[in-house]
Amino acid sequence: MRRELVAAAVRLFRTRGYEETTVDDIAAAAGVGRRTFFRYFPSKEDAISPDHEVALARIDEVLTTAHPTEPTASLVVRAGETVFDLYAEDPGLSVERFRLTHEVPALRDRESARVDHYRRLFTRRLRERFAGEPDGDLRAAVIGAAVVAAHNLALRGWLAGGGRPDDVEHHRERFRKVIDLLPREPGTPDVTERLEAAVARLERHA
Amino acid sequence: MRRELVAAAVRLFRTRGYEETTVDDIAAAAGVGRRTFFRYFPSKEDAISPDHEVALARIDEVLTTAHPTEPTASLVVRAGETVFDLYAEDPGLSVERFRLTHEVPALRDRESARVDHYRRLFTRRLRERFAGEPDGDLRAAVIGAAVVAAHNLALRGWLAGGGRPDDVEHHRERFRKVIDLLPREPGTPDVTERLEAAVARLERHA
């Protein structure tokens, strides 16, 4: 039923216009009453974004079940990719939603708020992970914001290009590049520093 | 007049409650009519945040007038600090606004939207700065999001602690630490180049 309601909402928003469509219209088009609609969605705006809670739950599961030794960059990219997967499961709906979000101010505001939920979830979990580390809060805030921004850029790139299944991997790869732009794990001297130190030891012996 | 209206709005929101206060109440308390109020603010929500456009303009000025050789990290921190200055000019109002933003859902949503304006402005200007560089869009998105997240964390830390003038410098310093967490400037010597230099030093000693 959820699926039927989403399909009806997308069809009506597109043909009749978002503002002109009521919850009653969507319910009727799906062959049910408005009470049934409200069992699935709290409001009209939610009828085309049914996956937000699922997306947050998937991210949270990855972040809370990760092994403590997994590098943070790999962890946050894994978590972000679950959202990519979710959008890629139904490219037609994802593209339609993307278009409507750009055209309808009410949906755009909703979308901004949603993106901020992701950012706050990442930041909160990372703060727990970095608890006790110097400037752990700051690192959590920076990484949380950075990973969500990179994810959105890549996902929107895919959707703006029509959401073609053949293109998913290219844009997913683009998202993964954020790994190189995230702050270095504290406590792990980077490759360069370690090698420079090795050469310096060698120099002392030369 | 703007200042009087802001003072009246803060006083009424605090004593009577945000929802219970009307634009007419604010105007009357400042000794003017509602038409005068609307000459200064588009809505009730804006009455306690009159500086948003000023803040965006200051950020934009720093970003658009910067010398091309200034390191990006120093540039974005300079731009972010102009907003810190703005809040520090009137700590009492800033703290009051911060408290109300936490208590009133309508103001909280407004605040999220505002923060997103900052992020988008940084990202847009950085994208121009990085035009033609590989993954310039991604770097712009990551740095824009990171700097705004760090700024908010530091600013909110200061306001949550009461917005004391003596503490400003400490929280400003906290914001500046974001410099160490931003991606490396492309074109700065990479791993290979640094190792080549180290090995060259070794060769000279061999």
Image (spheres, coloured by chain):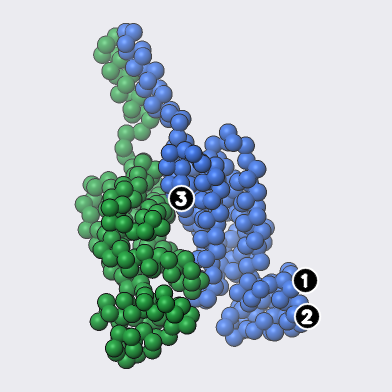
Chain colours: A blue, B green
Which is closer to the viewer, label 1 or label 3?
3
- Is residue B205 something one can see in this rendering? yes
What amino acid type is highlighted by mark number 3? Answer: Ala
Q: Tell which of B52 and B49 is nearer to you.
A: B49
- Whether residue A156 can be seen here: no
* Structural crowding at the residue carrying mark 2, measured as other residues with C-alpha within 10 Å and reported as few (<14), some (14–19) or many (≥20): some
**Regarding mark 1 in the picture, which secondary structure is present there?**
loop
Measure the alpha-carbon separation of dots 2 and 3: 44 Å
Q: Chain of mark 1?
A: A
**Residue B11, x across and y down, in percent:** 36, 77
**Amino acid on which disc 2 is placed:** Val
Q: Quadrant of the N terminus of chain A?
A: bottom right
Q: Are marks 1 and 3 on the same chain?
A: yes
Q: Is residue A184 above or below residue A155?
A: above
Q: Which residue, given by chain and number where applicable, does mark 3 sit on? A: A141
Q: Horizontal placement of A96 versus B113: left or right? A: right
Seen from this angle, which residue lies furthest front? B15
Q: Which residue lies at the image location 41% right of the left edge and 74% below the top edge?
A: B14
* Contact (Cβ within 8 Å) of mark 2 with mark 3: no
* Numbered disc 2: secondary structure: loop
Does the CB distance between marks 1 and 2 fall below 8 Å?
yes
Between marks 2 and 3 in the image, the one whose residue lies nearer the viewer? 3
Q: What's the residue type where badge 1 is placed? A: Met
Q: Please identify the quarter of the rendering in which residue A128 is found.
A: top right
The disc numbered 3 marks a residue on which chain? Answer: A
